[in-house]
Image: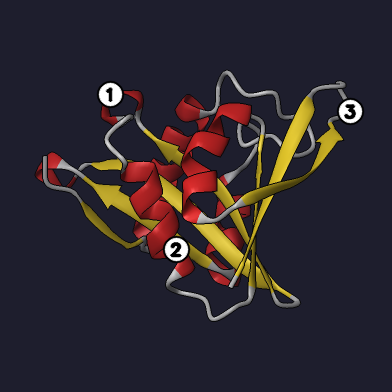
Amino acid sequence: MIIVIAKATKEDLPKILELQKAAFHNGVWDSKTSPLKQTLSDITFDYQKGVILKVLGAKDEITGSIRAYNNEGTVHIEKLFVKSEFRNRRIGSELLRKIESFFHARRFEVCTSEKEMSKMLEPQGYKPFKTDKTADGKTLFYFEKWR
């Protein structure tokens, strides 16, 4: 399968938001940080403050996305997802490498509700550095990478 990773356009945002909500429906996020609660206005703000990438599959269908922004020298990588039928093909790893290439920072940080993400993050140089609890008492895992 041939995929293309490209910067998202403003016109892509409604579709990315729709796919994001489907991808994160089983997450442990609390109501304040939930990708399920994000609005078109929220994702537009993310688009304006950072970089959003999309994965294009067959027929230029969006099959995944990732976003990141730089805050005081740390690049925060968020909302990495790939549609379920395209998982386990290293697309997530490619998204991560591609988004990193947009930033000239020394530190990158990823927060996830899925501990299993360590299988993708650690081989790319990310190390766990803290955990946190949501308002609902569920665990969030934080990983960082230094260049």
The residue that label 1 is drawn on is 85
The percent coordinates of residue 54 (x first, y second) are 34, 53
The percent coordinates of residue 73 (x first, y second) are 71, 77
The residue that label 2 is drawn on is 99
Q: CA distance from mark 3 to mark 2?
A: 29 Å
Q: Earlier in the sequence, mark 3 or mark 2?
A: 2
Q: In the picture provided, is 143 more to the left or to the right than 139?
A: left
Q: CB under 8 Å between callouts 1 and 2?
A: no
69 shown above or below 87: below
Q: Residues within 10 Å of mark 3 (few under 14, many from 20)?
A: few
133 shown above or below 94: above
The residue that label 3 is drawn on is 135
Determine whether the residue tagged by mark 1 lies in a helix, strand or loop.
Answer: helix
Q: How many labels, in total?
A: 3
Q: CB under 8 Å between callouts 1 and 3?
A: no
Q: Which mark is residue 24?
A: none
Q: CA distance from mark 1 to mark 2?
A: 22 Å
Q: CA distance from mark 1 to mark 3?
A: 31 Å
